[in-house]
Image (tube, rainbow, N blue to C red):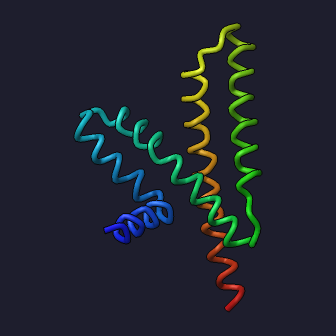
Amino acid sequence: MSHLIAYIVAIFITFPIVVTVGLYYILKRIYKHPKKALHRSIAYSTLFYIISVMIMLDHLFQSSYIGSIILFLLVVLMSFVILQWKFTHEIIFKHAFKLFWRSMFLCFFVAYVLLGITGIILGLIRI
């Protein structure tokens, strides 16, 4: 049973698009509102994209980038909090984190696609 769970998690990390699309259809039936379902599915699947990009970077360039990614996440979150403070003179951490998390989805989705294309190209060159 534990092997089955490990395989499912490995598939979710390898193909986070499957998680996003699957969650969208499930949440669309639950909420009956496509926009809300899209936002929730993006929020729930962002972590899979982050982990997937870390693994792809490690595989393609034989180096660990966990520290760099964590530092990047912290700097971007700090930037959103500072910008919110500058524009509104008050910090609502929930709003700053929501904006941060959605932007991280976009950032890591693009990184996932670009690293996938890079992996395909490097694989073809090595043949």
| Relative vertical location of residue 11 with respect to residue 17 in this rendering, above or below | below
Residue 117 in the image: state x and y as whole percent.
62, 69
Residue at the (64%, 56%) spot, across then down: 111
| Relative vertical location of residue 8 with respect to residue 22 in this rendering, above or below | below
Residue 106 in the image: state x and y as whole percent.
58, 45
Quarter of the image for the N terminus: give it. bottom left
Residue 17 falls left or right of residue 72? left
Front-most of 76 and 124?
76
| Relative vertical location of residue 100 with respect to residue 64 in this rendering, above or below | above
Residue 58 in the image: state x and y as whole percent.
69, 67
Q: Quadrant of residue 40?
A: top left
Residue at the (55%, 37%) spot, across then down: 102
Q: Quadrant of residue 53?
A: bottom right
Residue at the (63%, 66%) spot, across then down: 56
Front-most of 8 and 103?
8
Q: Quadrant of residue 36?
A: top left
Residue at the (75%, 51%) spot, across then down: 67
